[in-house]
Amino acid sequence: MNKKLTICFLLFVLLFSSISFADTTFNVMITDLTEVRDGVYGNTVGYIKKNTVKTIYGKRLDGNGRVWYRVWIDGKAGYIYGASVSKNLREVEEQSIKITQSLNVRRSVWGRKIGRLKRGSVKIVYGKRRDASGEIWYRVWYKGKAAYISSKYTIDNSKLIAITYDDGPSAQYTNYLLKQLKKEDVKATFFLLGCNIDNDTKHIILRMKRDGHEIGNHSFSHTYMPSQSDAFIRNDFGRTDNRIKAITGEKPKLVRYPYGASDDRIRNIVGKSEIYWSLDTKDWETRNRDQVKESILNNVKSGDIILLHDIHKTSVYGSLDAIKVLKKRGYKFVTVSELMRRKGIHMKQSGIYFSANE
Ligand SMILES: [Zn+2]
């Protein structure tokens, strides 16, 4: 009986420790020669060279309360002293890229060619460097060594989503939404209605701008535009542009037409990049927090533009629920313009866009 209990306890400890390790995995760039030991009180088993990227698999405290990081070296677990973290380690944010054109790999930005990457290959970027001409070079791992490739012929291969909210700002819900988006480090795009922009909502729009969200024009009156005159259309979008500019200092470059209804005549008058969506949550119809959440989680893929309305409480809460889950699945949330830029799509003034997957 005792033995069984001991085994159970050991299994529990094992399981628990593996979970806590998994939770703290992150990548670092080791910026100076660093000693590795086989235990917190162990012997030196090797050194990590300067400018090496390593994955940290967990932390351990020694008797003096000092932090040690667990790394993998020569196929074995080792420990590096954490006090050097601020000095010797720099956290690296992994970025996945795809090569769009066959590309030379160089030893350094100015160095010799050591190989070539095929079009379509996927690489992880561990750092960036700018050469004298201002061109950005990516640091990648190539045949076991650090190397550099030009960023010119690459696109971002990360799982990116643009989440968009129409018909606001809502004096009731948008402020709360902005607070939560900031907490989650999510950037969104808001297609505002001119008729909702006044002294009472001005601070909300200022906050959108300050927090790095993108602001688009959704008309003033939310009218079905194809049946309106040229003058009406010009005035309706112009008034909204002006109200936004009075607050943020700039006119929106993006438009989303009410009901997604537009034609060449309207396009010519408004002259903005026209943004649709690839994932319609039907949030205005269901008005149900869980259904909003599920409609996103069941249909989303990288490159999507998601349609929501921040004038409904259920849309705000449902989308925040989905965001939390998707972040755990490795998705990042960016503005529409950022999504297009990172996916290598050059938005034109009168272009029409549904997602970054076309
Ligand atoms: Zn609308």
Image (tube, rainbow, N blue to C red):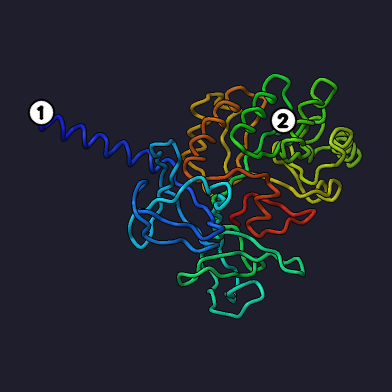
Q: How far apart are the two marked residues, 2 and 1, measured between alpha carbons?
A: 65 Å
- Identify the image quadrant of the C terminus: bottom right
Q: Does the rendering let one see residue 102?
A: no
User: In the image, what residue occupies the spot 89% across and 42% down?
Assistant: 230
Residue 233 position in % (x across, y down): 86, 39
User: In the image, what residue occupies the spot 59% across and 75% down?
Assistant: 106
Residue 140 horizontal side relative to residue 271, left or right: left
Residue 356 position in % (x across, y down): 62, 53
Residue 191 horizontal side relative to residue 50, left or right: right
Under 8 Å from ligand 1: the CB of mark 2?
yes
User: In the image, what residue occupies the spot 81% across and 29% down?
Assistant: 221
Q: Does the rendering let one see residue 261?
A: yes
Q: Quadrant of ligand 1?
A: top right
Instruction: Please say if 34 is above or below 297.
Output: below
Residue 2's label in the rendered image is 1
**Which one is in front in this view, the residue at disc 2 or the one at disc 1?**
1
- Snapshot quadrant of residue 189: top right
User: In the image, what residue occupies the spot 49% across and 42% down?
Assistant: 299
Quick one: 193 or 325, which is closer to the camera?
325
Find disc 2 in the rendering and name its residue.
167
Residue 331 position in % (x across, y down): 53, 45
Quick one: 240 or 122, which is closer to the camera?
122
Mark 2: amino acid: Asp
Residue 16 horizontal side relative to residue 264, left or right: left
